[in-house]
Amino acid sequence: MIAMKYFGVLDYIFMAIYVLVLVGLGFYLRRLASRSLDNYIVGGRNLPWWAMGVSGMANFFDLTGTAVIVSFLFLLGPQGLFIEFRGGAVLVLVFMMLWTGKWHRRSGCLTGAEWNIFRFGDGWGGRFAQQMSVFATVITTIGMLAYLIVGAGSFLSMFLPYTPMQCSIVLLILATLYNMVSGFYGVVITDMFQVSIIMAAVIYMTVKAFMTVGSSAEVSAIAMQVTQNPDWISALPKWCAHMPKGYEVYKHLTLFMSFYLVRTIFGGMGTGADPRYFGARNDRECGLLSLLWTSLMAFRWPLMIGVAVLGLYTVHELCPDASALTRAGELVHAQYPDVSKPEWGALVAGLSNTPEQYSSGLIAGLKTTLGADQWMEKMQMLSYEGTVNPEKILPAVLLLGVAKGMRGILVIALIAAALSTFGSTVNLATGMLVNDFYKKWIRPKASTRELIFASWAGVVVLVVCGTLFSVTLKSINDVWGWLMMGLGAAFLVPSFLRLYWWRFNGGGCAIGSIVGLIAALVQRVVAPNLNEIYQFIFTLGIGLAGSIAGTLLTSPTDPEVLNFFYMKTRPFGVWGHLKNSLPEDERKKMTAEHVYDLVSTPFALLWQTCLFLAPMMFVIHNWPGFAWTLGLCIFGWVGLYFFWYRKLPAANFYKD
């Protein structure tokens, strides 16, 4: 069996302990989570900020995203970070840390959908916006689950004698069971356990990669041979970067980086409706949990560049003749001319794991082309285009570059990352489904027990829909790009305007969300291969038109509702007539808060970007690059410290 080939007894012991602890924690926390809907959705607003900060890190440290980012780091070196300005670099944390997190906390709401009633009132507009928020979150969650399913399946099928979908289903069953019973308590507490495993993986892979690299010149030469990228060790984005077949669209790296940065700034300014902020006890804790969240995310990047470096060495040793993969791809395509890109992963996994079920002539040809020694491992790395599949670098490194025993721990760490992301994503959506749809419209007087059971049903429905959607996807980068630039753009305008424009109302929010969502789905069906920039422009343009038209064609928000929202939230933007109604001392205090938040933004963006770049420079021995990025990181932190951290209140800026 292939599993016995790659895992030893110690690996299986570690895996068994992990599963037992995870399931045990889930059932232990069941009683706490079941006390009330508040407990199930936001942990009763009684969890410490540092626990939620650690949980946030585990949420964003997902397996599939890690594989995507590793693929770009493998191709581009540290410059791969700039592609992930679209989402993987989590620059939205800057805005959640500085102001959007505390703005949402001040509402006292349980969910982002309920927040729409707080913002627009309990009339038709607010209710419409509330239900659109539920629907949008459900659609986004289904997309995220599909993304997680494809990534986890691709990863696990390298180790187990099953197809990617079969591997994903086993993982989903485990994740679904423990998330159903433990709610947000389970998300946070199990994240604490899982982060300890993840940190062990970070330390091991970072040290191993650092010791493997002889010098920056050595890794640069190997990268040139494997990826044909002459600037692999540089941290400066190039206007025209070398990209292989299937990734040519990203060759104008600086253009994409700039576009992604603008998208992230506007998207980040509309974020903050996260259970961690609704569950925070005060404004200060919103900032502190975000600061810890961001700082812990820095550990992800030395791990990923370490995997990318080891991937270069692995491919260099395993496939010194890149043309062999091209010929192997031609053999497979000749035998299966109608195979589609979404079907490619299952076909390659089958050829590698169960070759006896396929044509003996094809298998003989693949062995001859790839070499009888390790031909199965080489097949697993074969992309649809006949090149090294960058999305397979992560499992390939674990498979070929890590000894048994440690391999099990690393696999568990990445599975833990996948389960953490699954838990947070599903908890957010089920919270809205139960609190803002089932309880509000179907069973207003439902007991806590009934609402908990309804949340369990919601988890099952979301997982089934995500699984069905996943079978249509070509690759994890394909769906990640659409989630960030297509579907994400559908809700960007309403999310932004609701915080910064007083005239924006429930009708504009709902209509803008509907037409933006329809545009994103139509684009996905009609033009799935559309460039990400055009996806964003198309969906955003339609969403903007729908939001403005919906706002101007419907009545303004009730002045009393609007004033109540403004007095509790204290946002900046186009709120002039409401701000002018405040006493002068209140206006000065609020202006000072806003000025410090805004002035801190460029320092925070610089600090976070260099916080991620500096350890990557260290791992690849690029000492001049490390010195520059570390210096800029310190400069960014000094500005952030003086303009933001020192200004944090003991609890709240204003009385609740």
Image (cartoon, rainbow, N blue to C red):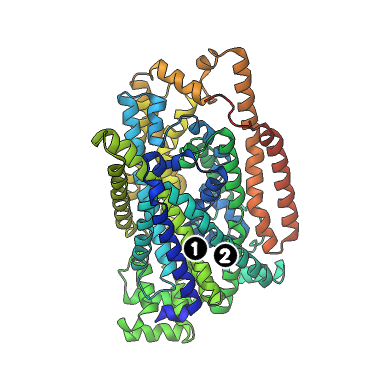
Q: Give coordinates of residue 264: x percent, y percent.
A: 52, 42
Q: Which residue bears the numbered disc 2? A: 201
Q: Is residue 200 left or right of residue 537?
A: right
- Mark 1 or mark 2: name the one nearer the start of the chain: 2
Q: Is residue 538 visible?
A: no
Callout 1: SS: helix
Q: Is residue 116 above or below residue 29?
A: above
The number of callouts visible is: 2
- Residue type indicated by callout 2: Ala
- The structure residue drawn at horizontal position 43% and vertical position 80%, both measured from the top left corner, is 4
Q: Residues within 10 Å of mark 1 (few under 14, many from 20)?
A: many
Q: Which residue bears the numbered disc 1? A: 414
- Residue type indicated by callout 1: Leu
Callout 2: SS: helix
Q: Give coordinates of residue 118: x percent, y percent.
A: 41, 27
- Foreground: 360 or 204? 204
- The structure residue drawn at horizontal position 58% and vertical position 78%, both measured from the top left corner, is 317
- Foreground: 208 or 278? 278
